[in-house]
C-alpha cells in the first residue's frame, strides 16, 4: 500500500566568519581597526548571529539558556547589549582583558559551554569581539549606518550534473551609501534536505531536486530558489500541446529543468479523477462506461462543466470549508453547526463570489442560530485567536510566532501581531444558558449565543504594556470612520482585488484541493522565505481568479481543463523524482468521507452514522459528532471516519485532516463494519448473485462500479476461478444456480465469491488512492 510522508521544515544554520570590505576603495560602515571601534549593531550583532548565539535553540530561546537571554535572531540590538554588557553586574565582559571575558571564553571553548565551541580564539569573529571590548564595548549608536538593502547573487539557479556546488555572493547596502561583501557574515538556511550549505554560502547538492536557500543578514532575509538537476545530455523536450495558460507556465519550468511531463491519463483514470476531485464521489458504472465510450474530442471539458453544475459540488466543497472554519458541535452547538454548514453550502451552491463569502464571515454578528456567519466569531473567542485565524485562512499567513517575539522567518513584528489583533477587540457575546452535557468540559457550550460589537478592553502589547493601535497586516492604521466600524473596514481591505495575499492564498487553497500540493506549501505559510514553486503560475492564477470575480467554479474549471491536471501519475525517466513541479499527477490517499461513500456506492448499502438519517452521505455530515454522541456508542460509519483521519476541527487549518495510512485502518477494512455491509442480503452483491447475468458480466460490473474500468484479462480469469471453485460445472444453467441458492442459501458460492471479490476491490490501492 502506498504511504505518504510529510517532512517538517528542517533548518540548518551555519555561522562562523565576519564581513570583509567589498572593495579596497570603498569605505565600510564598520571598520575593525584600532582607529575606529566596531559598531555594536552592524558589526557585533552579525557575529553573534553567525555563531548561532541568538537562535531559538540557544540564548534566543524565550527563556534563554544558562542564565543568558538574547533577542531571537538578533531582533533587538539594545536589549542584547544590555544582556551582554550590563546584566549580571557586567560579569560577562572584561574590557581591561578582553580575552578573559566570560562570554568569549565560553564561545571559544575556554570554559565549559552548553552550546559547544562557536569559534576559535584565532578566528576573525573572536578578533572583532576583542577589538570591540578594547574600545570599551560601546553600545548601539543612533548615528550608525542602517542596513537598507541586501543583494544576493544569483537570485535563482539551476545546477546541472556533474556540477554539484553553487556559491552565493551577498552584498549589504547601508544608509550612508556604503556597501560591503557580507558573504562570510550572513547566515544560511535551507528549506529541505536536498542540499547542504557551509559557512561561506556554498550550497552543495545531496540529492537531485529543488531547495530554497534563505540568506539572512541582520533584519533582512532573501530566498534563493535552487534546482539541482541531472545532466541528461540526450534530453529532448517532448513539446506537449498546452491546453491553457496553466500549462504554458508549468511546461516552461519543466523544460528549463530538463523534465518531460507524463502523457495524458487515459479516460478511465480521468473520469474517476474528475468525479472525485469535483464532487467527492466515483462515477457509477453506467456513467464511467458512457464517458469512456464517447468518441467526442471535447468530452473531458463537457464532463467538467457538468460536474461543476451538480449539487454534489456544493456538498463536497462545503466539507472543505467546514474543516477550516471549525464547524464542530462542542463550541458551536449542534444547531449552530447545522446552520453554519448549511450557510456555507448554500453560498457555494449559489456560486456566491468568494470575496463576498469572506466579507460576510469577518463582519458576521447576531444570533449564531439566526445569523450563520456569526459562528465564525463564536468559534474564535478572543482577539488573538481571531487575528491568527483570519490571517491564516484569508491571508495565508502564520502569525503565531509574532505573539511572543518578532517572527523569525517572516517580516511580521510583535507590534504587527497586536495591532492586527486589536482589529478584533470590540467583539463581545451575549450568552444564555449553557446546557452542556459534560459539566466538566469548559470548552463545550450548548445553546444560543449572540455575537455583537461592543466597547471592550483594547489589546495591549505585553512587551511595551501599551495599547495596540488597530492596523491592517502590512497596511495602514485605522482612523476616522474605520475606527468606529473596524470589522467593516477590515472586510473591505481584506477582500480587495489588489490585496495580493488574500487573492493568492485563496487561489492556492483551491489549487491544493485539486492538485494535492500547493504552489505555496504549506498552503497557509506565505512568506518571503517560502516562495511559490512556480511564481509566474501563481501570479497568473491569482490574477485570473480576481478577474473572474472570485468565482470558485471558474477557477476549478480552469485548473481541471489544463493538461497539467490531466497528466498521468505514471512517471517517465525524467520525472520519476519530481515532487514539486507538477510533471505528473501525484498519488494521494482519499479523504475519509470519500472512501466511506465510495464503499456505500459500490455495495449500494449506506453506512450508518449516529444521530443522522439512513442514506446521508459522509460528505454531507455538517459537523463532527451528533447530539447523541455522548449518550450512545458511535456507529461503524463514525468509527471509520475517525480512523481514516476526519479532523476534530479544533484547528483552523487543513493540516488537521490526516490522509496518512495506518495499521488501524487495515484492521477496520477487514473488520465487522465492512463485512456486515458486504454480507447484507439487500446490497448490490446479493442482487448480482441472483441475477441472470453471466459470471463474466457480473465481475465486469463490479470492476466498473469500484474502479471505473473493466477488469484486465488476468483479473477476469482470477475472479471467475474464485466464483467457479474446484467443483464448478460449466454446463450448469442459471436456473440450476438459483435453485441451489433457494434450497441452500449458505451454499451460495457465487454470493460468497462476489463478497470476496468486492472486499478485494474495496481494499485495493487503486480504490483507496486518487491517481
Image (tube, rainbow, N blue to C red):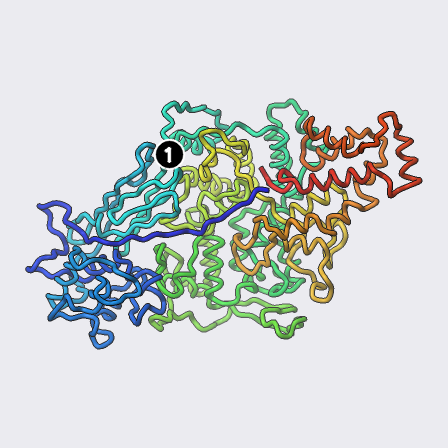
Query: Considering depth in this image, is 704 or 176 the residue closer to the camera?
Result: 704
> In the picture, residue 116 is in which quadrant?
bottom left
- Foreground: 398 or 768? 768
Q: Is residue 519 above or below residue 411?
A: above
Vertical order, 752 against 119 (above or below): above
In the rendered image, the residue lying farthest to the bottom is: 89
Q: Which residue does the image show at 11% across and 47% down from the upper left? A: 26
Q: Quadrant of the C terminus?
A: top right
Q: Decide if residue 21 is on the left or right side of residue 164.
A: left
Quadrant placement of the N terminus: top right
Q: Label 1's element?
A: strand
Q: Which residue is mark 1?
A: 229
Residue 230 in sight here: yes
Q: Residue at x 16, y 50 (%)?
A: 20
- In the image, 249 versus 658, the foreground residue is 658
Residue 495, image x, y percentages? 47, 51
Pick the residue in front: 521 or 477: 521
Q: Position of residue 275 (x, y in %)?
A: 63, 38
Q: Furthest-front residue in view?
A: 726
Where in the figure is residue 318, as x and y percent of width and height? 61, 50
Q: Is residue 401 left or right of residue 769?
A: left
Q: How many marks?
A: 1
Q: Is residue 88 above or below residue 351?
A: below
Horizontal relation, residue 254 to residue 589: left or right: left
Q: Quadrant of residue 470?
A: bottom left
Residue 470 at least partly seen: no
State the image coordinates of residue 224 (x, y, percent, origin top left).
32, 43
- Picture layout, residue 382 above or below residue 655: below
Q: Residues within 10 Å of mark 1 (few under 14, many from 20)?
A: many
Amino acid at each position: 500500500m502506498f504511504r505518504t510522508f510529510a517532512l517538517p521544515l528542517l533548518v540548518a544554520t551555519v555561522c562562523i566568519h565576519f564581513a570583509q570590505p567589498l572593495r579596497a576603495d570603498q569605505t565600510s560602515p564598520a571598520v575593525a581597526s584600532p582607529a575606529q571601534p566596531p559598531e555594536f549593531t552592524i558589526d557585533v550583532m552579525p557575529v553573534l548571529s553567525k555563531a548561532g548565539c541568538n537562535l531559538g535553540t540557544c540564548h534566543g530561546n524565550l527563556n534563554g539558556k544558562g542564565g543568558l537571554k538574547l533577542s531571537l535572531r538578533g531582533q533587538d540590538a539594545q536589549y542584547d547589549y544590555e544582556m551582554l554588557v550590563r546584566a549580571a553586574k557586567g560579569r560577562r565582559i572584561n574590557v581591561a582583558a578582553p580575552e578573559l571575558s566570560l562570554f568569549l571564553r565560553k564561545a571559544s571553548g575556554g570554559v565549559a559551554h552548553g552550546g559547544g565551541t562557536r569559534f576559535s580564539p584565532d578566528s576573525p569573529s573572536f578578533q572583532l569581539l576583542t577589538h570591540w571590548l578594547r574600545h570599551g564595548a560601546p553600545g548601539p549608536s543612533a548615528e550608525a549606518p542602517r542596513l537598507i538593502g541586501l543583494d544576493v547573487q544569483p537570485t535563482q539557479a539551476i545546477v546541472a550534473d556533474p556540477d554539484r556546488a553553487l556559491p552565493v555572493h551577498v552584498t549589504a547596502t547601508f544608509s550612508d551609501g556604503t556597501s560591503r561583501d557580507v558573504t562570510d557574515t550572513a547566515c544560511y538556511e535551507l528549506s529541505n534536505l536536498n542540499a547542504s550549505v557551509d559557512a561561506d554560502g556554498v550550497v552543495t547538492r545531496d540529492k537531485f531536486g529543488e531547495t530554497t536557500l534563505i540568506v539572512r543578514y541582520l533584519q533582512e532575509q532573501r530566498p534563493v530558489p535552487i534546482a539541482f538537476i541531472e545532466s541528461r545530455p540526450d534530453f529532448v523536450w517532448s513539446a506537449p500541446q498546452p491546453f491553457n495558460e496553466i500549462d504554458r507556465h508549468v511546461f516552461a519550468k519543466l523544460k528549463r529543468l530538463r523534465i518531460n511531463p507524463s502523457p495524458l491519463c487515459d479516460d478511465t483514470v480521468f473520469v474517476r479523477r474528475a468525479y472525485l476531485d469535483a464532487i467527492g464521489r466515483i462515477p457509477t458504472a453506467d456513467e464511467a462506461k458512457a464517458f469512456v465510450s464517447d468518441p467526442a474530442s471535447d468530452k473531458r471539458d463537457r464532463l467538467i462543466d457538468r460536474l461543476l453544475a451538480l449539487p454534489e459540488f456544493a456538498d463536497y466543497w462545503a466539507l472543505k470549508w467546514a474543516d477550516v472554519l471549525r464547524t464542530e458541535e462542542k463550541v458551536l452547538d449542534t444547531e449552530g453547526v447545522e446552520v453554519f454548514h448549511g450557510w456555507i453550502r448554500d453560498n457555494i451552491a449559489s456560486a456566491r463570489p468568494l470575496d463576498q463569502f469572506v466579507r460576510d464571515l469577518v463582519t458576521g454578528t447576531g444570533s449564531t442560530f439566526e445569523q450563520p456567519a456569526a459562528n465564525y466569531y463564536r468559534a474564535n473567542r478572543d482577539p488573538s485567536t481571531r487575528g491568527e485565524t483570519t490571517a491564516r485562512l484569508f491571508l495565508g499567513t502564520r502569525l503565531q510566532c509574532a505573539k511572543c517575539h518578532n517572527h523569525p522567518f517572516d517580516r511580521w513584528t510583535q507590534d504587527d501581531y497586536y495591532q492586527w489583533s486589536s482589529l478584533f477587540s470590540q467583539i463581545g457575546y451575549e450568552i444564555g444558558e449553557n446546557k452542556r452535557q459534560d459539566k466538566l468540559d469548559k470548552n463545550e457550550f450548548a445553546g444560543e449565543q449572540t455575537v455583537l460589537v461592543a466597547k471592550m478592553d483594547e489589546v495591549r502589547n505585553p512587551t511595551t504594556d501599551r495599547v495596540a493601535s488597530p492596523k491592517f497586516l502590512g497596511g495602514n492604521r485605522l482612523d476616522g470612520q474605520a475606527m468606529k466600524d473596524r470589522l467593516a473596514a477590515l472586510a473591505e481591505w481584506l477582500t480587495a482585488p489588489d490585496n495580493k495575499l488574500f487573492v493568492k492564498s485563496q487561489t492556492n487553497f483551491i489549487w491544493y484541493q485539486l492538485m494535492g500540493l500547493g504552489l505555496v506549501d504549506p498552503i497557509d505559510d506565505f512568506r518571503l522565505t517560502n516562495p511559490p514553486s512556480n511564481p509566474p503560475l501563481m501570479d497568473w492564477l491569482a490574477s485570473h481568479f480576481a478577474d473572474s470575480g472570485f468565482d470558485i467554479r471558474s477557477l476549478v474549471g480552469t485548473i481541471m481543463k489544463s493538461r497539467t491536471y490531466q497528466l498521468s501519475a505514471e512517471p517517465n525517466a525524467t520525472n520519476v523524482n519530481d515532487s514539486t513541479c507538477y510533471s505528473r499527477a501525484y498519488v494521494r490517499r482519499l479523504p475519509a468521507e470519500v472512501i466511506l461513500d465510495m464503499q456505500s456506492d459500490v455495495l449500494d448499502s449506506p453506512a450508518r452514522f449516529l444521530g443522522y438519517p439512513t442514506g446521508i452521505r459522509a460528505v454531507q455530515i455538517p459537523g463532527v459528532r451528533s447530539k447523541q454522541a455522548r449518550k450512545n456508542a458511535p456507529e461503524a460509519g463514525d468509527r471509520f471516519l475517525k480512523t481514516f483521519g476526519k479532523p476534530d476541527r479544533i484547528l483552523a487549518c487543513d493540516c488537521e485532516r490526516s490522509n496518512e495510512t495506518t495499521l488501524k485502518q487495515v484492521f477496520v477494512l477487514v473488520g465487522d463494519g465492512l463485512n456486515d455491509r458486504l454480507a447484507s442480503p439487500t446490497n448490490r452483491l446479493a442482487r448480482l448473485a441472483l441475477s441472470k447475468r453471466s459470471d463474466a458480466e457480473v465481475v465486469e460490473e463490479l470492476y466498473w462500479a469500484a474502479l471505473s474500468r473493466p477488469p484486465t484479462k488476468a483479473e477476469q480469469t482470477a475472479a471467475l476461478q474464485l466464483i467457479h471453485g474446484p467443483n464448478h460445472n460449466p454446463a450448469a444453467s442459471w436456473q440450476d444456480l438459483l435453485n441451489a441458492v433457494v434450497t441452500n442459501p449458505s451454499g451460495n458460492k457465487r454470493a460468497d465469491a462476489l463478497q470476496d471479490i468486492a472486499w478485494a476491490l474495496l481494499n485495493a490501492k487503486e480504490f483507496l488512492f486518487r491517481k
